[in-house]
Amino acid sequence: MTLTVQDLHFSYGSAPILRGLGTGELARGSLAALVGPNGSGKSTLFRCVAGLLRAKSGSVRLDGHDLAALSTRERARKVFYLSQDTEARVALSVFDVILLARKSLHRGFALAASVDDVRAVEAVIVELGLEAFASRDIGTLSGGQRQLAAIGQALVREPDALLLDEPTSALDVRRQLDVMATIRAATRRRGIVTMVAIHDLSLAARFADHILVMNQGRIAQSGEPHEVLAHPAVSETYAVGVHLERSARGTLLVEPYIQVH
Amino acid sequence: MTAALPLGTTATADYRQRNARRLKLVGLGLAALVFAVALDVSIGPGNIPLADVLRVLVDPQAAEPRLSVIVWDLRLPIALMALTVGAMLGLSGAGMQTILANPLADPFTLGVSAAATVGASVAIVTGWSVIPGAGVFIVTANAFVFALAASLVLFFMTKLRGVSAETMILVGIALLFTCNAITALMQYRSNEVQLTQIVFWTLGSLARATWGKVGIAACLIALALPFFLMRGWALTALRLGDERAESLGVRVDRLRLEILVATSLLAAVSVSFVGGIGFIGLVGPHIARLLVGEDQRFFLPVATIASATLLSLASSVSKAINPGVIYPIGIITALIGVPFFVSLVMSIRSKAA
């Protein structure tokens, strides 16, 4: 039971973005962190996996089945991609926005939400601690609160594969920890494959089962956090030195530094 | 999950309450609409007391023929035309605003009405039909094809990068000027009968309402509203932006095209029946957005009802200003609509700043 990306190629016009990217097998119930410099192709990879972009060649398989064979709706049921852009200011409440993620595939006249849908939304609101502003319009919220509403959409959706593009970029320290822990718990509990694109290497090391280092459209290195982060590929990818240390509490801390020659 | 779910949080209670409130607003809107239509029927040349009007409506057989003719053949068609055209313009404007993510969009401001007028005037003056064999529907058919063409131009504009809401309106104004020039050209070439017809179109007037037109418009609304509502969730998803809607499984381009065709049809039919009535499709949806927010399940019907109510009220105004005279309703809606439009533009600008 896995998500496997093989030999994926994609280019915008003549500029190649993905150059034969392969992730290896990502097991269900595991959380993979995708790290890499700006413009290395992380969002493009997610869009290709979710089917928003059509790869030039290569395959994306979920539990052995090629996702390209699925219709837009079937694919959207199995894979959910949370884009980085969560800024939309609309007269919809946080509750409405999360409920929408359960109903968006619905087409027909049963316009009301079922009790199950409402229950699921409620559970996510409690899980993410959104009660205080769940009834407010997202247009009136802060960037971080809007991002939390978007994460709520990802969690309420119950896909098989979850792709989160920098879900913690606008969150405060406490919320970052809460959200990453919630995502990891949901991944384990539901037995889904989750990939999180993230810039904070310490946060990645702390919550991910695997880290994939992306550089120039390929996976430069992958494996368990402590192995990958100690590998020279990380320094090369970011052009920084990397100092690793265990804190007194046993947490792996990553300190990148600029090397002076 | 095994643990008992925390049913009945305040968030859920709020959601249920909000839904109940929005449903109540739909009901209140309908009541306001009935009132506005009744008012519209009761006002007009002939000085008939309201009680007599009601009596004629309830029991047409018993009424004296003169009254019966005035109410059934003159006033009711106009009042119901105001109702149905208002509804069509409101739904059309609401749909355009949603798919273009632009609160300033409506058939009039985007030049779609003007394009329909061009199509109609071409049909009136030259007799040339875009759809061969359109027969008696030649004017409507031309209006529709031209309106659709204008909508498609706007659709491709939205695909260009960096096109803001205000830029879209500028494009609409450019389209409006172009269309007005072509319409003027047609007027210049026309004979007296044709000229009267075109002027009627450009002003926007309910005076040529007939039961037949009312019937067609009512059918169209009865078909279009469910067509929009079926796509209610997908349209709400679109409000979060294209990429997020797409990852929610919405086929964005197809949805946009479907709605665009439907809004063009609504705009074209209303223009071909009553001419260019502006700003109703702008003000109605704006009121709806303030009342029920942008959950399209509520937004679309409330926008439709609000616009129908507004046009009915405008129709009453057009008859009440100078008793005995019915002013073209397009003049009334423009006089009320333009200041509103300007204030809407200003509020968007100050939000962006």
Image: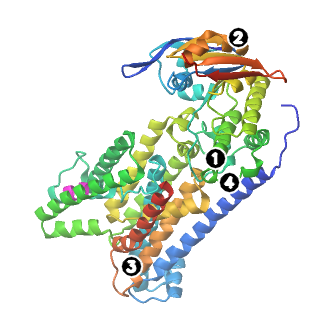
User: In percent of the image, x 46 and y 46: which residue is there?
Assistant: B99
Neighbor class of circle 1 (other Cα within 10 Å; few <14, some 14-19, many 20+) is some
Residue B80 showing in the rendered view: no
Q: Quadrant of residue A100?
A: top right
User: In percent of the image, x 38 and y 88: which residue is there?
Assistant: B323
Q: Disc number at residue A133? A: none
| Subunit of label 2 | A
B70 left or right, relative to B235: left
Q: Are marks 3 and 2 on the same chain?
A: no
Badge 2 amino acid: Glu
Residue span colored magenta = B118-124
Q: Disc number at residue A111? A: 1
- The residue carrying mark 2 is A227
Q: Percent from the top left, x then y, of residue B111?
A: 32, 56
Q: Disc number at residue B318? A: 3
* Label 1, label 3: how far apart the Cα atoms are: 38 Å
The question of residue B121 being in magenta is answered with yes
* Label 1, label 4: how far apart the Cα atoms are: 22 Å
| Subunit of label 3 | B
Element at label 2: helix
The reply to whether the C-beta atoms of the residues labelled 1 and 2 are less than 8 Å apart is no
